[in-house]
Image (spheres, helix red, strand yellow):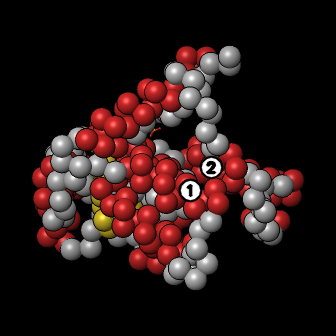
Amino acid sequence: MPATPNPLSEMANLKSIVVSDDERPNTSFTKSALPGFKKTVNSRRAIRIFDGVSIPRKIMRDCLHDAILAPSASNLQSYEFYWIQNKAKKEKLAKLCLGQPAATTAGDLIVVVSRVDLWRSHLCKLTDIMTHNGAKPLEGAIGDYYQKIVPMLMRTDPFGLNNFVRRILFWYKSLSEPTVNGPAKRADHRVYGNIQATLAAQTLMLSLTAHGYESCPMGGIDRKAIRNLLGLPSSAEVTMVIGAGTGKPEGLFSSRIRLPYAELIKEV
Ligand SMILES: Cc1cc2nc3c(=O)[nH]c(=O)nc-3n(C[C@H](O)[C@H](O)[C@H](O)COP(=O)(O)O)c2cc1C
């Protein structure tokens, strides 16, 4: 089988986008950004007791704006954040977080949902933005990528036919060249969506820290009941709930513990 051109490699040859110095890391950027970044990363801790006061809406919106700047596969942004405003719903949600204090005392609760099921709608919207509503159609490598490759990777059907075809295709291609192995099946799509939702969730937590607030990611939750509470379809998957607000000193349950560097990082 002849090696096929990779649109992602071809895109590297396209005319690059011109951005200002402030938008790309450079020496002066590093000097000003690094101390703040280190401080933010070091200060973010899982805080389990808050004072119950909501974060000002303007600040929370700013943090959520930061969150959606997280990277996502094919830029499909396959997630949603549900920032719970309704008091009764917030109380119900806290119960579905198994009554954890990080939920019952949080000023705000945000549900992070993987929406890989929305890939087609996100792709259409993305294409509309990139083509100025069709005025400037996608061409060449970018066109191939978004019109052929992304649908080929994401398409599903009730009988699993697309999954089967993808697995055969990946296997066949891998006989002659390095190739992606997924997403092929439903489990791969679930992982794919949760990865993106998690990156956005982490960006939200770092932004909350940089804004002077604290957070706790919660995975010990009743995902299905939370999905029902939000009226979401079974194709949506709750990735985590984030409790946020101003932490109380007693909300920090332990000093920070990490395994040795060499345990987690292999310099190969
Ligand atoms: C996916 C995920 C799920 C988590 N679930 C919970 C949870 O249900 N309850 C909780 O108190 N902390 C939860 N945590 C927080 C971790 O326990 C915490 O991040 C870890 O102990 C490290 O502490 P640090 O975040 O303060 O550095 C979760 C963290 C992650 C990333």
Give the left or right position of residue 36, taking residue 22 as reference: left
The residue at the point 31 percent across, 65 percent down is 82
CA–CA distance in space, label 2 to label 1: 7 Å
- Closest to the observer: 41 or 136? 136
Q: Position of residue 190 (x, y in %)?
A: 32, 43
Q: Which mark is residue 144?
A: 1
- Closest to the observer: 25 or 34? 25
Give the left or right position of residue 151, taking residue 262 as reference: left
Instruction: Please name the amino acid that badge 2 sits on.
Output: Pro
Q: Position of residue 56 (x, y in %)?
A: 42, 75
Kindly give the residue lying farthest to the right in the view shown. 27
Residue that mark 2 sits on? 7
Q: Position of residue 138 (x, y in %)?
A: 59, 68
The residue at the point 57 percent across, 61 percent down is 143
Dot 2 and dot 1 residues touching (CB under 8 Å): yes
- Closest to the observer: 252 or 5? 5
Of mark 2 and mark 1, the one earlier in the sequence is 2
Q: Can you see residue 247? A: no
The quarter of the image holding the N terminus is top right
Instruction: Please name the amino acid that badge 1 sits on.
Output: Asp
Q: Position of residue 265 (x, y in %)?
A: 60, 22
Badge 2: residue crowd in 10 Å (few <14, some 14–19, many ≥20) = some
Assign a secondary structure to mark 1: helix
Assign a secondary structure to mark 2: helix
Check the image and report above or below for 6 versus 120. Answer: above
The quarter of the image holding the C terminus is top right
The residue at the point 18 percent across, 48 percent down is 158
